[in-house]
Amino acid sequence: MEKNIKKVLIIRCGALGDLVYATSIIDALRLQYGDDIKIDFVCTPGPANLFKKDDRVNRVFILKHKKIPIFLSKQKKEIINSSKQEQYDLLINFESGRQFQSLVKAIKSKEKIGYFASKVDHGDARHMVDITKTVFKDIVSKEVFEQSAPRLIGEDIDILKGKFNLPDKYIVISPSNSHNKKSRLNYRAWIHTHWKELIEELSEDITLVMVGGYGEEEFFKPLMPYPNNVIDLVAKTNIPELVGVIDGAVATVATDTGTAHISSAVNTPIFCLIGPTPADVTGPYKHDNNKVFIVSAGLECSPCYKTEVMKNCNDNICMKQITPKMVIDSIKSADL
């Protein structure tokens, strides 16, 4: 007999990509328990904006300071008190950090799964999405589990076309990544001269839409001036608008970063430039309904992320040796 689950709380307080991974639970719950299920999330402030236009999510609780104990945290108290007023049928915790143990224990829910609540067995799962999915494997059918994948809902494309003067066909270019402001070498970055060459050549055939976050404007200056056929949306979109812009694109070109994960979650073909990171672990998630193209130099030392090889690398050759021609050839050979 199927469980009577009507109200669920999900805890996922990581970075943007982590929350994108966790959205695989939303459609899985709706398919298994009905579209009228109430799904609440606990998220960090920035990534929580992913749900601004998503009517599948009932309520979002913001948790800014994860390590503050309950008795000092107004935000944690709000989550707990809300669960006392209307108990959850199910709590799903995707956070493995010890700072979440007391919160999981204090929330009122008939059933709890995930870290600090039930045994979590990742089995042979390798990609972060598949690892995330193992947490809820036992509460959905095999069919629902196998077809579940991240999915996002952004701003309506017709609204965005009017606001940003977007054409019907365009490619999103996302040169930056979350490591731009770190003092050490940005191992995931593609060099500016390569980006500039790619932008100049691609813009001869199709409109390009440049995207980047607030505070990243300095990173884009070496790429300027842009060709005439480029629309500059750097620091001009909020997260729902960014999701919508990517959703409406013919394709996205990015490094291993949040925009690549967004692209795969809205089924926009993504050409992802990857060097040090393992594409089959942290790269954009590939499934039956999307198209993921990994562009790599294929060096023997890759992937090397968080290893001594990466620490001793001062030249970032695995990214430098990805040429603009390799990216362009990949785009031209794809069935878009």
Image (cartoon, helix red, strand yellow):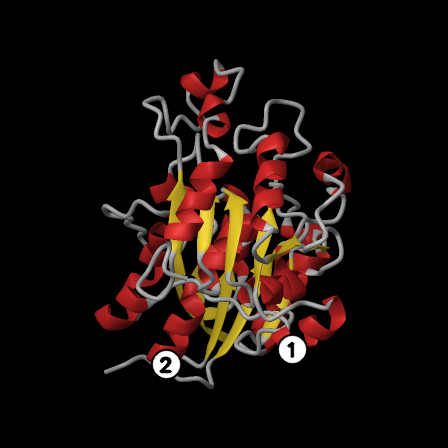
Question: In this rendering, would 287 be left or right of 270?
Answer: left
Element on which disc 1 rests: helix
Marks 1 and 2 close (CB-CB < 8 Å): no
Q: Position of residue 1 (x, y in %)?
A: 23, 83
Q: Residue at x 28, y 49 (%)?
A: 121
Q: Residues within 10 Å of mark 1 (few under 14, many from 20)?
A: some
> Which numbered disc, 1 or 2, marks the residue closer to the eye?
1
Instruction: Specify the amino acid type for callout 1.
Output: Asp
Using residue 269 as the reference point, say whether residue 176 is left or right of it. Answer: right
- What x and y, as percent, mark residue 254? 53, 46
> Residue 33: which numbered mark, if any?
2
Q: Nearer the viewer, residue 198 or 148?
A: 198
Quarter residue 276 falls in: top left
Q: Is residue 44 above or below residue 184?
A: below
Image quarter of residue 138:
bottom left
- Residue at point 50%, 37% (across, down): 324
Query: In this view of the protein, can residue 284 be seen by the observer?
Result: no
Residue 321 in sight in this render:
yes
Residue 156: percent from left, percent from top: 62, 76
| Circle 2: residue type | Tyr
Residue that mark 1 sits on: 158
Tell me the SS state at disc 2: helix
Separation (CA) of disc 1 from disc 2: 32 Å
How many neighbours does mark 2 have within 10 angstroms: few (below 14), some (14-19), or many (20 or more)? some
Residue 105 at x, y percent in the picture: 49, 57
- Residue at the far front in the pictured view: 204
On screen, residue 151 versus residue 215, left or right, reads left
